[in-house]
Image (cartoon, rainbow, N blue to C red):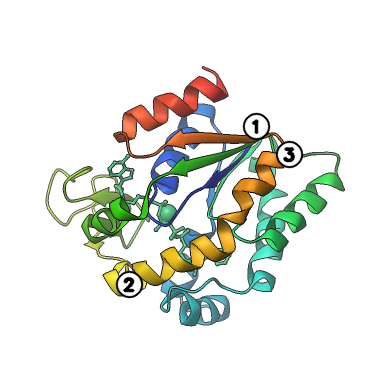
Amino acid sequence: MKIIMLGAPGAGKGTQAKRIAEKYSIPHISTGDIFRANIKNGTELGKKAKTFMDQGLLVPDELVVDLVVDRVGQDDAKNGYVLDGFPRTIPQAEALDNALAAINEKVDYAINVDVPDENIINRMSGRRACVSCGGTYHIVYAPTKTEGVCDACGGELVLRDDDKPETVKKRLGVYHEQTQPLIDYYNKKKILVDIDGTQDMSQVFDAIVKVLGE
Ligand code: AP5
Ligand code: MG
Ligand code: ZN
């Protein structure tokens, strides 16, 4: 099962991808998490990516595509994967399709988690991310047992650098311009699944499972 998560920043791609990965025992591959891990470890890739991410801009395609093609070719991805945050541009989608076609494979589902812009800013200001494991919470919708401490690993929770309201607005603009065209791209391939992302997290997940199967 090869799944792509589409949706605006803050739509809940990461939240749902994590649940999908657990239920269907496939890896959750988030390009945003990969970049954040590289930034934390001070790698060259991290340094390059940070300058774009902090401005709310996309990292250039050439820094993303090879990384993902390599990742989905690893052993644990043999039975499928859920891609979260990739592809984000038409050239990225084409590069993925070409890499899969070369081994006689294709994407099975593109799940679009649909949330209007009005709801997004509110979600992002309440999001908290774990600096150690990348776990995601929300101060109102997904609170931790102890404030400021990750339930999963005990790590410290922070507001992501790019979750400031000005940067979120910028990211939304970039999403509409560069990523939204992918909805049409996958619709034409007849693998698009539209999900109402304004429902609560479990309802969103139930709607996804209805499509993917128990
Ligand atoms: P990335 O990390 O992918 O960020 P994003 O797409 O902006 O999406 P987010 O992670 O912010 O949101 P999400 O949809 O995962 O929502 P979440 O589940 O956390 O990318 C960051 C940056 O990296 C990009 O800006 C770019 O620079 C770069 N990058 C990454 N991939 C790239 C690529 N392929 N090409 C180029 N550049 C790339 O949920 C949000 C909050 O809402 C949470 O607090 C959550 O608890 C809460 N929530 C979730 N669902 C619900 C619900 N149903 N109801 C209420 N609250 C909810
Ligand atoms: Mg995410
Ligand atoms: Zn953690």
Residue at the spot of label 1 = 1
Query: Do tag 2 and tag 3 residues touch (Cβ < 8 Å)?
Result: no
Residue under the image location 43 percent in, 73 percent down: 56
Question: Measured from the top left, where is residue 188 in percent x and y?
Answer: 72, 41
> What element does badge 3 sit on?
loop
Q: Quadrant of ligand 1?
A: bottom left
Q: Which numbered disc flags the more N-terminal residue, 2 or 3?
A: 2
Question: Measured from the top left, where is residue 141 in percent x and y?
Answer: 21, 43
Amino acid type of disc 2? Asp
Q: Which numbered disc flags the more N-terminal residue, 1 or 2?
A: 1
Amino acid type of disc 3? Lys
Query: Local crowd at mark 2 within 10 Å, few (<14), some, or many (≥20)?
Result: few
Relative placement, left or right, of 97 versus 16 is right
154 versus 26 height, above or below: below
Q: Choose top left, top right, bottom left or bottom right for residue 4.
A: top right
Q: Choose top left, top right, bottom left or bottom right for residue 167.
A: bottom left
Residue at the spot of label 2 = 161
> The N terminus lies in which quarter of the figure?
top right
Q: Choose top left, top right, bottom left or bottom right for residue 196.
A: top left
Which of the pair 199/74 is nearer the observer?
A: 199
Residue 189's tag is 3
> What element does badge 2 sit on?
helix
Q: Which numbered disc flags the more N-terminal residue, 1 or 3?
A: 1
Which of the pair 145/5 is nearer the observer?
A: 5
Q: CA distance from mark 2 to mark 3?
A: 36 Å
